[in-house]
Image (cartoon, rainbow, N blue to C red):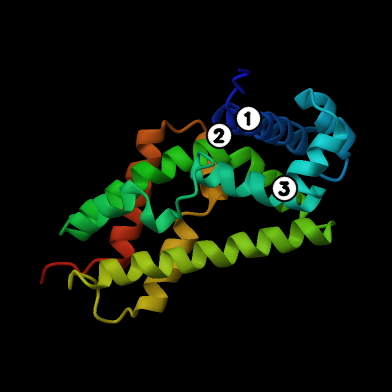
């Protein structure tokens, strides 16, 4: 009797994930230098060590590759878990003091910006000339603003913020303070240690939003 070998789908899935990661890593390098517009998908495929047909099969288009690169860079992995469902969000919600919430978020922000700064700055540059990049940049801005609106509601709910600020205004302050270009200027260009950047973020947002004792 001939025994058929069971199809090992888990191994094939892992190989697919490795291929996808290799392409994303190649794109993260080439979209930064020489840049998104200057990088054809054939160059990304060659950098990743895969056939260009494989790249198209995985991502479909250059625009989709850029979009998924941004998503993975922000999240830090390719797990199908939305940012609001990530552990750091639950940790922020568990804290009662608004400054403590900001400190926990600042720690997360340093990790994210250290990972995303080059890609996001490259995207911002590409958005000035490429319609697809501009659309993805705008989508990222809108998503960040929605995320900061959720965080603002969390902070306002503590009852410790200035009474003259509503949720929308707090969200605007949070959105501005967490912009990756602040991290780029202070840490990457001016050489601030990450800890100093975290203190700057907490002090700046706290001073602008938290009510001072009478």
**Left or right: residue 160 compared with residue 29:** left
Instruction: Indicate the secondary structure of the residue bearing disc 2.
Output: helix
Q: Is residue 129 above or below residue 111?
A: below
| Place of residue 114 in the rendered image (x, y in percent of width and height, measured from the top left) | 51, 36
Instruction: Choose the circle earlier in sequence order: 3 or 1.
Output: 1
**Left or right: residue 195 compared with residue 186:** left
Q: How far is the residue under mark 2 from the one under mark 1? A: 40 Å
Whether pointer 2 and pointer 3 mark residues with C-beta atoms closer than 8 Å, the reply is no
Q: Which mark is residue 66?
A: 3
Instruction: Choose the circle earlier in sequence order: 2 or 1.
Output: 1
Nearer to us of marks 2 and 1 is 1
* Other-residue count near label 3 (Cα within 10 Å), few / some / many at <14 / 14–19 / ≥20: many
Q: How far is the residue under mark 3 from the one under mark 1? A: 24 Å
User: Residue at the location (49% across, 43% down)?
Assistant: 79
**Which quadrant, please, contains the N terminus?**
top right
Residue indicated by mark 1: 12
User: Residue at the location (47% across, 62% down)?
Assistant: 175
Q: Quadrant of residue 157?
A: bottom left
Residue 39 seen from this side:
no
């Amino acid at each position: 009797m001939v025994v058929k070998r069971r199809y090992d789908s888990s191994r094939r899935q892992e190989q697919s994930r490795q291929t996808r990661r290799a392409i994303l890593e190649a794109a993260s390098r080439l979209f930064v230098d020489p840049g998104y517009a200057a990088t054809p998908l054939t160059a990304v495929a060659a950098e990743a060590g895969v056939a260009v047909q494989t790249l198209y099969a995985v991502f479909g288009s250059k625009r989709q590759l850029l979009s998924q690169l941004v998503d993975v860079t922000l999240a830090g992995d390719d797990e199908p878990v939305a940012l609001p469902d990530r552990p750091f969000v639950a940790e922020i919600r568990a804290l009662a003091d608004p400054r403590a919430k900001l400190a926990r978020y600042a720690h997360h922000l340093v990790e994210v910006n250290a990972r995303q700064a080059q890609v996001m700055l490259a995207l911002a540059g590409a958005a000035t000339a490429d319609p697809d990049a501009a659309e993805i940049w705008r989508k990222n801005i809108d998503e960040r603003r929605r995320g900061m609106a959720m965080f603002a509601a969390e902070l306002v709910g503590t009852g410790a913020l200035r009474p003259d600020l509503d949720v929308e205004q707090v969200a605007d302050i949070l959105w501005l303070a967490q912009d990756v270009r602040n991290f780029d200027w202070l840490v990457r260009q001016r050489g601030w240690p990450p800890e100093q950047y975290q203190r700057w973020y907490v002090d700046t947002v706290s001073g602008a939003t938290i009510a001072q004792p009478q």
